[in-house]
Image (spheres, rainbow, N blue to C red):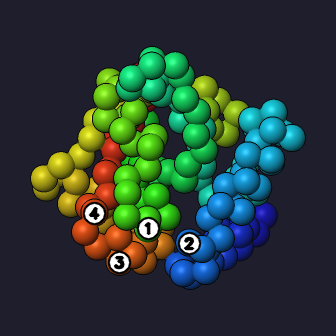
Amino acid sequence: MPKSPLPALGRAIGRRPLVMRAAPAILALERLVRRVTRGRHGVLDLAGLPSMQLTVPGRKTGVPRTVSLLYVPDGPDTLLLVGSNWGRPQHPSWSANLNAAEFAEIHTRGERFEVKVRRMSGPDRYRAWNRALAAWPGYAMEQRLAPDRPFRLYELTRI
């Protein structure tokens, strides 16, 4: 069976600055697709890219918050999350909640499971950042758009 061209196309499109300007429309479409498919699929899934729904308690309220995100597979039981926020100057709100959490829940590819959260720093972060760039080169463009904000980078390990 031939390999799908969609992931390569998605990565190529993701390097374009236009995508950053279209972020609000893409996020609205993501919410619509998730609602219509009852959470089973999102826009990134349809493009053949690795996506998940992350559920983490709010750091102030403790109320579970769910957000759809692109992730980087990093081994059989590990995922990387990059807090790029589409290259905006501020960190994404979900990353503040993840900073305060030891555990979170992931819903991806029809499966739900708990993960241990670790914010990356130092040499580990540097190596993980290079793996993230290899998987999604658009992160480099997003970092250029927010040069004064090092992106938060997380390792999520399946429990």
Q: Residue at x 58, y 40 (%)?
A: 67
SS for tag 1? helix
Discs 4, 2 touching: Cβ within 8 Å:
no
Q: Earlier in the sequence, mark 3 or mark 1?
A: 1
Q: Give the CA distance from mark 2 to mark 1.
A: 7 Å
Instruction: Give residue 87's mark.
Output: 1
Q: Earlier in the sequence, mark 1 or mark 4?
A: 1
Q: Residues within 10 Å of mark 1 (few under 14, many from 20)?
A: many
Discs 2, 1 touching: Cβ within 8 Å:
yes
Q: Where does label 2 land, which residue?
A: 20
Q: Earlier in the sequence, mark 2 or mark 1?
A: 2
Q: Give the CA distance from mark 3 to mark 1.
A: 7 Å
Q: Give the CA distance from mark 4 to mark 2.
A: 16 Å
Residue 141 higher or lower than 113, as above or below = below
> Residue 148: where, in percent of width, then height?
25, 69
Q: Residues within 10 Å of mark 3 (few under 14, many from 20)?
A: few
Q: Where does label 3 land, which residue?
A: 144
